[in-house]
Image: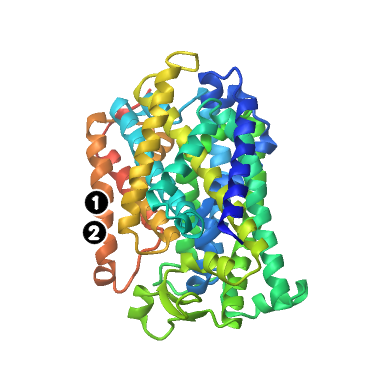
Amino acid sequence: MHPLVLLLVVLLYFAALIGIALITGRKSDNASFFVGNHKSPWYLVAFGMIGASISGVTYISIPGEVGSTAFSYLQLVLGYFAGYLVIANILMPLYYKMNLSSIYVYLNHRLGLFSYKTGASFFQISRIIGSSFRLYLVAMVIDSYILARYGFPFWLSVLLTIVLIYIYSFRGGIRTIVYTDTLQTLFLIMGALLSIVFISRELGFNFGALFENIRHSRYAQVFVWDWKPGDNFFKHFLSGMFICIVMTGLDQDMMQKNLSCRNIGEAKKNMYWMSSLLIVVNIFFLSLGALLYIYAHAKGVIIENFSDSGLQAACPIRLFDPAQNGFYCSGTDELFPNLVFNYLQPGVGLIFILGLIAAAYSSADSALTALTTSFCVDFLGFREDNQRILTRKMVQVGFSVIIFLTIMIFKSLNNQSVINSLFTMAGYTYGPLLGMFAFGIFTKYQIRDRIVPYIAVLSPVFCYFLDRHSEQLLSGYVFGFELLIINGLLVFTGLYLFRKKKAD
């Protein structure tokens, strides 16, 4: 498909998002920006949160990772479901009882000012890194397959991506995001399903043949019982549960949507439905990944480096480049776009671009809103009224610039699958939040509040050292995403050691 056609479709898509923003952003104030005036329909929140949870990382990275990890990612997703139950029945009732706009205000009430500012700061760092990883993917694809063909540099692709998010989110905030995320989740799911349909047709598979080919392929393995690898079932399940708790339940971005529901009953319904549907949607994406590899091998497009583990680390796959008439070393994130734009029929390219943009923007737009909300409430002391709206807009511009710069830094440093990068960073940055909230909820102790920032910084540093040397220190044990649990436990222990008398 011609890049100009793709560009026009993308512009029409954003025109629709801006139209929604104009309608929902009328007569908006800080209350609508922060919590949607507590009027968001729970079913729209639930459906939209699927897109926000999946993002462009799932859309590209998870299908690509199937080549090296098969369906073992589903172990993590099953852990998510357990995590959502914890969020719905422990964290959300607490947030609604306190009528919070920013969830980190809880830390101020329970532990103290330094804990409050530390928690909010770690969220800011975590969300900036996570959003930058996600937006990097969509900017990379738009750059490679659309703008670069007209001579535009990568930085311009990133800038346009962020500017468009700002345009449709700066007025209505979360009230707008609830509706735009619903539309984007619809496109995301349609993108995955239609891609499966078109690829199956090219391979001559009906539904039965599709199911049997995936089931009997080496990609269909779900469970890993060997205790040493990072993708062991118990490591993945527990990590998934805690990743979900911290990246949803302790994350202002994800919880802001839940806090916009009318009451705790509707917020719980949203969480139960979303967590169930998320398992189904991830199975679609894993199946898509298996199908992509089956197609690539059938067409002679791919070489996977099974024999040389050193080569596997440096060059996970080799893809055929039709323009150069030869193979080149590639990361697994490039498999899906390479097949879409070089081998599959043009309509698949259009579906891919719409699905990818929907996936990336459904998480990035709410992240920008959440970062703005957290900074305004947690550091500038805003309330849910009409005070300092201009300041709020300037804060949103500031975070847009920060995310832009972070993406550019990430592009110069990244050398692994984005999905692994994202969860690895989550282990370091969300761990202190896990430890602080767990200590506040499950103990009655007061703490020496001024020491909390030091504990929160030292714990990730220790975890980094432990991760780098675990094979030598622990008889070949390799940490996976469960490093997040260790990090949170270290912070919890540090707070316990510096506790004071029990709270009244």
Q: What is the x, y in percent for residue 158?
A: 42, 47
Q: Is residue 286 above or below residue 361?
A: below
- Res. 62 in view: yes
Q: Residue furthest bottom?
A: 307
Graded by Cα atoms within 10 Å as few (under 14), some (14 to 19) or many (20 or more), the crowding at tag 2 reads few
Q: What is the x, y in percent for residue 283?
A: 63, 62
Q: Is residue 326 above or below residue 154?
A: below
Q: Label 2 is placed on what type of residue?
A: Phe
Q: Which mark is residue 465?
A: 2
Task: Kindly identify the residue that appears in the image at 49 percent across and 25 percent down.
Answer: 101
Task: Kindly identify the residue that appears in the image at 28 percent across and 69 percent down.
Answer: 474
Q: What is the x, y in percent for residue 310?
A: 33, 79
Task: Identify the secondary structure beneath mark 1.
Answer: helix
Graded by Cα atoms within 10 Å as few (under 14), some (14 to 19) or many (20 or more), the crowding at tag 1 reads few
Q: Which residue is mark 1?
A: 461
Q: For the C terminus, which image quadrant?
A: top left
